């Protein structure tokens, strides 16, 4: 297996782990509850940071094949989480976790299958 493929698979694993934790953490929570709890807010922000940072580590050739995913926007969200931490809206965090991750995970599944079925080149 190529190093690029290993790196991409590791990133996908990290993203999935973070998404699973985010969903568990935020299940049934309102933005108001998240905003009122420093622990919930920091944990949810950190989970999204991991998703965003690991997205940077997916090889561009795979991203190019999944052009329906706003890769740049996901990466940029990580920059906002790191550098504009005082402007983060808990409603956006909840909306992102509840609404935006399904198509993203489906794309990750397809990338993973491409790597596993290595008869095809990315």
Image: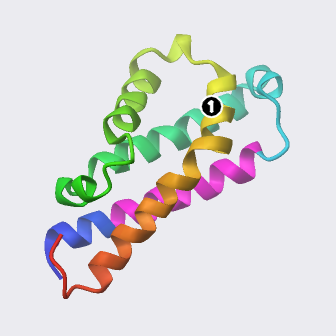
Q: Residue furthest top?
A: 86
Q: Position of residue 114 (x, y in %)?
A: 30, 76
The region drawn magenta spans: 10-26
Q: Nearer the viewer, residue 31 or 112?
A: 112
Q: Nearer the viewer, residue 37 or 2?
A: 2
Quarter assignment of residue 28? top right
Q: How crowded is the residue under tag 1: few (<14 C-alpha within 10 Å), some, or many (20+)?
A: some
Seen in the image, is 16 located left or right of residue 79? Answer: right
Q: Position of residue 66 (x, y in %)?
A: 32, 56
Q: Residue at x 17, y 58 (%)?
A: 61
Name the residue tied to disc 1: 93
Q: Position of residue 41 (x, y in %)?
A: 67, 29
Q: Main secondary structure of the magenta part?
A: helix
Q: Residue at x 18, y 83 (%)?
A: 1
Q: Residue furthest front?
A: 68
Q: In terms of secondary structure, where does tag 1 sit?
A: helix
Seen in the image, is 30 located left or right of residue 101? Answer: right
Q: Say if the magenta span includes residue 16.
A: yes
Quarter assignment of residue 121? bottom left
Q: Residue at x 31, y 35 (%)?
A: 72
Q: Residue at x 37, y 78 (%)?
A: 113
Quarter assignment of residue 7? bottom left
Q: Position of residue 116 (x, y in %)?
A: 31, 84
Residue 76 against residue 48 in the figure, above or below: above
């Amino acid at each position: 297996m190529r190093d690029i493929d290993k790196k991409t698979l590791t990133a996908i694993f990290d993203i999935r782990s973070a998404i699973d934790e985010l969903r568990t953490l935020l299940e049934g929570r309102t933005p108001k509850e998240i905003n009122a709890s420093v622990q919930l807010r920091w944990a949810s922000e950190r989970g999204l940071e991991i998703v965003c940072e690991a997205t940077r580590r997916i090889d561009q050739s795979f991203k190019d094949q999944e052009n329906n995913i706003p890769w740049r926007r996901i990466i940029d969200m990580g920059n906002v989480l790191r550098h504009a931490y005082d402007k983060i809206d808990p409603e956006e965090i909840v909306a992102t976790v509840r609404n935006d991750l399904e198509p993203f995970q489906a794309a990750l599944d397809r990338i993973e299958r491409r790597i596993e079925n290595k008869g095809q080149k990315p």
